Image (cartoon, rainbow, N blue to C red):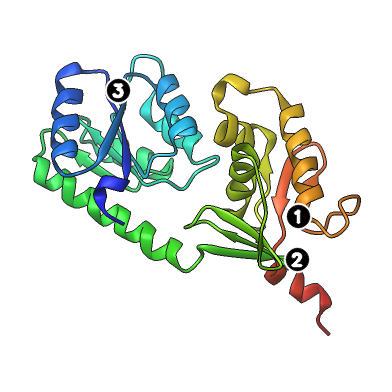
């Protein structure tokens, strides 16, 4: 995938730094979105699904470490912290919260771009082998953004696809209602758990052999949902 196809979210409350990062990343072929505080960063990440996040730690409404922590509740997107804080404790806190890398200000554009390329390369290497998810005759092709049932394309609405794709990116993992709402609908829909229930029922009708007894799109009562793939089911059928 070329860099031009990769959106990057830059989070910083200093206008000069935002402009400089937007210019350098744009010149390197990235599509840049920006946010000036933690709340708008979380909103943008949920709506835009960036390929990477470049994050300052000092934000006006919340600590960047908290932004890392909240992002890691539902996404594995690479997070590169860029901060004037260069103490060991600051770095450990950010990395423990889920950051992939830590760049101390001042830095060169070349260094940041090299670290960004390295982070994206690691993600590509891990995702390529898991771009196809199979369960019960269903194939979710995350690269082509399509779903097949017994080889036939299944018509899904954009929201239905995003819901099954989000579950497919984390097979076997329980995703809470809040995680799914953030990932599929955005922060403005927090608390609207009925959205998830309605769309999950639609997906089951389209993808499960017996929607009334789902084997793959499984409810974790009071918590959320998880996708059980054929590989995860296989041990139960063994000797």
Q: Is residue 222 left or right of residue 56?
A: right
From the viewer's perspective, is residue 7 above or below residue 20?
below
From the viewer's perspective, is residue 40 above or below residue 202?
above
In terms of sequence position, does the residue under pointer 1 or pointer 2 come before the other? 2
- Circle 2 SS class: loop
In percent of width and height, residue 42 lies at: 45, 28
In percent of width and height, residue 139 lies at: 63, 63
Mark 1 neighbour class, 10 Å CA radius: few under 14, some 14 to 19, many 20 or more: many
In terms of sequence position, does the residue under pointer 1 or pointer 3 come before the other? 3
In percent of width and height, residue 102 lies at: 26, 43
Mark 3 highlights which residue? 58
Distance from Cα at disc 3 to Cα at disc 2: 47 Å
Q: Quadrant of the N terminus?
A: bottom left
Q: Quadrant of the C terminus?
A: bottom right
- Circle 3 SS class: loop
Q: Closer to the observer: label 3 or label 2? A: 2
Q: Is residue 110 left or right of residue 64?
A: left
- Which quadrant of the view contains residue 60? top left
Q: Would you say the residues marked 1 and 2 are in contact, meaning their CB atoms lie under 8 Å apart?
A: yes
Mark 2 highlights which residue? 136
In the picture, the disc for residue 207 is 1
In percent of width and height, residue 197 lies at: 78, 35
Mark 3 neighbour class, 10 Å CA radius: few under 14, some 14 to 19, many 20 or more: many
Q: Closer to the observer: label 1 or label 3? A: 1
Task: Return the residue nearer the eye: 113 or 185.
Answer: 185
């Amino acid at each position: 995938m070329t860099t031009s196809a990769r959106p990057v979210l830059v989070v910083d409350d200093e206008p000069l730094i935002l402009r400089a990062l937007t210019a350098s990343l744009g010149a390197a072929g990235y599509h840049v979105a920006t946010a000036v505080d933690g709340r708008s960063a979380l909103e943008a990440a949920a709506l835009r699904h960036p390929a990477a996040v470049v994050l300052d730690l000092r934000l006006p409404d919340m600590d960047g470490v908290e932004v890392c922590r909240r992002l890691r509740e539902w996404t594995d997107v690479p997070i590169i912290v860029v901060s004037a804080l260069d103490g060991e404790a600051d770095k450990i806190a950010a990395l423990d919260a889920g950051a992939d890398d830590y760049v101390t200000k001042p830095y060169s554009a070349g260094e940041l771009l090299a670290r960004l390329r390295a982070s994206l390369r690691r993600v590509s290497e891990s995702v390529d082998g898991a771009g196809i998810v199979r369960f019960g005759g269903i194939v979710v092709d995350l690269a082509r953004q399509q779903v097949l049932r017994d080889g036939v394309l299944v018509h899904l609405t954009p929201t239905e696809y995003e819901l099954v794709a989000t579950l497919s990116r984390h097979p076997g993992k329980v995703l809470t209602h809040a995680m799914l709402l953030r990932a599929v609908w955005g922060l403005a829909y927090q608390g609207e758990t009925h959205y998830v229930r309605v769309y999950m029922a639609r997906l089951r009708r389209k993808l499960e052999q017996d929607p009334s007894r789902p084997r793959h799109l499984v409810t974790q009562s009071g918590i959320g949902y998880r996708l059980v793939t054929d590989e995860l089911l296989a041990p139960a059928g063994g000797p």
